[in-house]
Image (tube, rainbow, N blue to C red):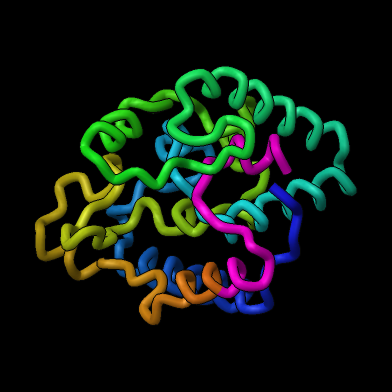
Amino acid sequence: MPCHLTPPRDQELIQIVNAALADAVQKSGKWLACKPGCSQCCHGVFAINQLDAIRLRQGLAELEAQEPERAARLRQRALETVARLSEDYPGDPVSGVLDEDDTDEAAKRWDDFGNAEPCPVLDPATGTCELYESRPVTCRAFGPALKSDGDLGHCELCFVGATEEEVIAAEMHPDPDNLEAAVVEELRKTTGACGETIIAFALARG
């Protein structure tokens, strides 16, 4: 995966998502369990797009310039994760690009893949994200009430004891104008970067 600079509108996207998160935090109040050291959402692999991947690689490059030893440990964790997952990887284990197959068999293969795997960006000593400012949009939106495929869901540690009305009232709208899809498409047209991957491959192959 070649290293590119993020498109100019990526910063606009991040500002929109961060503002939506701040609003969701305010509306959710006591129902949110998210805090430094809680790593519930940092276990189990998930797909990220090429925009997320580039942002993560830039974050790692910045960390390498500031704290090379810390960055080296992070990259080593990514390499070890890739080594563990490559044999059953639901995609190309060389490039890290995930298969686009939407069959039931492919979906089951993905559902059973890497569910307990810790994110390589997670600092095992502190339980915090070492590339927090560069994290994927999925990470920024996880926790608060969020609609996906027509259903309103949230982290299982959040909204414990809340009524359905309270959850609905706190719904987060991270990208109301679908800017992320537009920027991902812009990236594809200008660089050829396409397909989804996972965090470990984005960092180990970058």
Q: Give whichever of 12, 48 is nearer the camera.
A: 48
Q: Can residue 61 be seen in this view?
A: yes
User: Any magenta on residue 202?
Assistant: yes
Quadrant of the image containing the C terminus: top right
Q: Is residue 121 visible?
A: no
197 w.r.t. 88: above or below: below
Q: Which residue is drawn at 87% across and 38% down?
A: 68
Q: Residue at x 25, y 32 (%)?
A: 105
Residue 49 is left or right of residue 112, and the answer is right
Q: Give whichever of 180, 172 is nearer the camera.
A: 180
Q: Give whichever of 55, 129 is nearer the camera.
A: 55
Disc tally is 0
In the rendered image, which quarter is residue 51 located in? bottom right
* Residue placed furthest toward the bottom: 177
Q: Residue at x 48, y 35 (%)?
A: 91
Residue 102: horizontal and vertical position, in percent? 29, 45
Residue 89 is left or right of residue 61, and the answer is left
Q: Which residue is drawn at 62% across and 59% down?
A: 193
In the image, which residues are magenta? 186-206
Residue 67: horizontal and vertical position, in percent? 86, 41
Residue 130: horizontal and vertical position, in percent? 67, 42
User: Any magenta on residue 88?
Assistant: no
Residue 93: horizontal and vertical position, in percent? 57, 30
